[in-house]
Image: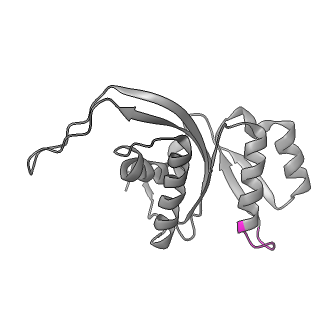
Amino acid sequence: MRRLLIRRCQRYRLMLTMAQGWPCVKEFEYRRHGTTGLFAAFNCGDGSAYAEPTSSTCAANFVQFLTGLEAQVPAHLELLCIVDNLSAHGTAAVEAFLDDHPQVFLHRKPTHGSWLNQVEMWFSILTRQLLDTAEFATTTDLAGAILDYIAEYNSRAKPFRWTFDAANKHAA
């Protein structure tokens, strides 16, 4: 589970495609038109993602995200969430939600331990396949495009095959 702030920007000039074999040219100057927060969870068992775009990453929005996520999980299963050090994760509202929902558990990962969380790989895929090249007129369009992407991604989702070789100290 992770949150991400995504800026809605518009480049001054269109992206130019070059001749075959050459990379495209992307304008480095852009106008900002606001940001959209994104809380996301990744199901390591089947490779699917669940996300909710939000206007901010405040505790109330995080509790709303947890409520929606919990609705996706069968009642007899526990919901184990790996979270980062966002201040909203430790607020009284979140603690009250966890007290009222004993099957939901938050596990905080260490600082600089983002590589431990598989949702980070999914955010990389989202960024490369959707966000790097797209432009959106409004933050609502951005949120809609993200939700459409997630629906399409989940239709072909597979678990990541992620291993760590301690002898060579690198991810395979």
Image point (72%, 32%), residue name: 87
Q: Position of residue 44 (x, y in %)?
A: 56, 64
Task: Name, please, the residue furthest toward the front.
Answer: 137
What is the quadrant of residue 75 in the picture?
Answer: bottom right
What is the quadrant of residue 162 in the picture?
Answer: bottom left
Q: Is residue 81 left or right of residue 40?
A: right
Q: Is residue 61 left or right of residue 148?
A: right
Query: In the figure, 101 relative to 6: above or below?
Result: below
In the image, residue 75 lies in the stretch drawn in magenta: yes
Q: Position of residue 170 (x, y in %)?
A: 38, 48
Is 32 in front, or is 60?
32
Q: Position of residue 41 (x, y in %)?
A: 61, 55
Can residue 168 be seen from the camera position used here?
A: no
Find the magenta span and give its range: 72-77
Query: Which image quarter is the C terminus in?
Result: bottom left
Q: Is residue 104 left or right of residue 19?
A: right
Q: Main secondary structure of the magenta part?
A: loop
Image point (51%, 68%), residue name: 154
Query: In the figure, 169 relative to 158: above or below?
Result: above
Image point (73%, 59%), residue name: 68
Can residue 133 be seen from the camera position used here?
A: yes
Q: Position of residue 90 (x, y in %)?
A: 78, 37
